């Protein structure tokens, strides 16, 4: 039986995310492609799922291909869930985003010595067909704690300050397979995979 599609465009301009999805999708009979260079979608949604849908639908319509989008971010308890859906726009570079996060936590800790540093990474995935209709959405969560300083050299984004207590490692200290399995994107993908395989036949 011929699958209903054999090409899938990943709706991201983030090279780290693209590589992660190429690795996750390697087991499927799909050519995994990047979105057009310079293509941007305004993220006007109020939730991770809404933003993932916006991106998947826009890229599907622009390319005429099936598109998979993720919207992900870090929600920190002590900051009222911030940076949340604004994680990527919290500052200009990864280093600046981490610095701002740690500064805001330090300021909060100065007022509360027993500050709750718990956090969770959230990833929402949306799959849209070439007409721009979203057919699947899932959401994966990974709980953790924000470290006082970065640890590890791997990963991207907030990975160096996101510590997973049960492993005793930050995301940036994990190998790609471990992060892929326990991370928020890996958990979301585990929910998406059986539905994606059913679509492919």
Image (spheres, grey):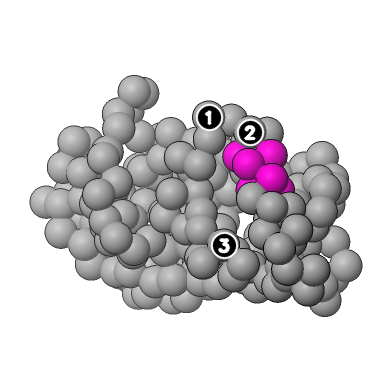
Q: Is residue 90 magenta?
A: no
Seen in the picture, residue 99 relative to 101 is either above or below; the reply is: above
The residue depicted at 21 percent of the width and 44 percent of the height is: 58
- The reply to whether dot 3 and dot 1 touch (C-beta < 8 Å) is no
Q: Taking 158 as reference, is 141 left or right? A: left
Q: Which of marks 3 and 2 precedes in the sequence?
A: 3
Residue at the outermost right position: 168
Residue 185 location, quadrant: bottom right
x%, y% of residue 65? 24, 44
Residue at 47%, 75% in the rendered image = 191
Choose the circle earlier in sequence order: 3 or 1. 3
Q: Dot 2, how many residues are within 10 Å of its Cα: few (below 14), some (14-19), or many (20+)? A: few
Q: Looking at the picture, tell me which residue is in the foreground, 187 or 193.
A: 187
Q: What is the C-alpha distance between the residues marked 3 and 1? A: 20 Å
x, y (%) of residue 123?
48, 62
Q: Which mark is residue 92?
A: 1
Residue drawn 69% across the image and 52% down it: 107
Give the residue at mark 3: 79
Range shown magenta: 97-103
**Circle 3 or circle 1, nearest the eye:** 3
Structural crowding at the residue carrying mark 3, measured as other residues with C-alpha within 10 Å and reported as few (<14), some (14–19) or many (≥20): some
Q: Which mark is residue 96?
A: 2
Q: Secondary structure at mark 3?
A: helix
Residue 49 screen position, x and y as percent? 33, 64
Mark 2 or 3, closer to the camera: 3
Residue 45 is situated, as x and y percent measured from the top left of the image, at 26, 56
Q: Is residue 117 above or below residue 41?
A: below
Q: Secondary structure at mark 2?
A: helix
């Amino acid at each position: 039986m011929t699958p209903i599609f054999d090409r899938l465009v990943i709706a991201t301009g983030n090279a780290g995310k693209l590589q992660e999805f190429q690795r996750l999708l390697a087991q499927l009979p799909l050519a995994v492609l990047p979105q057009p260079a310079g293509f941007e979608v305004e993220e006007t949604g109020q939730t991770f799922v809404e933003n993932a849908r916006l991106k998947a639908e826009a890229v599907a319509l622009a390319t005429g291909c099936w598109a998979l989008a993720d919207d992900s971010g870090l929600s920190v308890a002590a900051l009222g869930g911030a940076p949340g859906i604004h994680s990527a726009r919290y500052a200009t570079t990864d280093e600046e985003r981490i610095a701002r996060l740690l500064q805001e936590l330090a300021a909060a800790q100065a007022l509360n010595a027993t500050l709750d540093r718990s956090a969770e990474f959230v990833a929402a995935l949306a799959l849209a067909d070439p007409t721009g209709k979203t057919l699947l959405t899932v959401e994966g969560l990974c709980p953790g704690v924000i470290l006082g300083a970065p640890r590890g050299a791997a990963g991207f984004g907030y990975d160096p300050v996101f510590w997973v207590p049960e492993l005793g490692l930050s995301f940036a200290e994990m190998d790609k397979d471990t992060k892929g399995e326990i991370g928020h994107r890996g958990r979301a993908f585990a929910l998406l995979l059986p539905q994606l395989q059913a679509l492919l036949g």
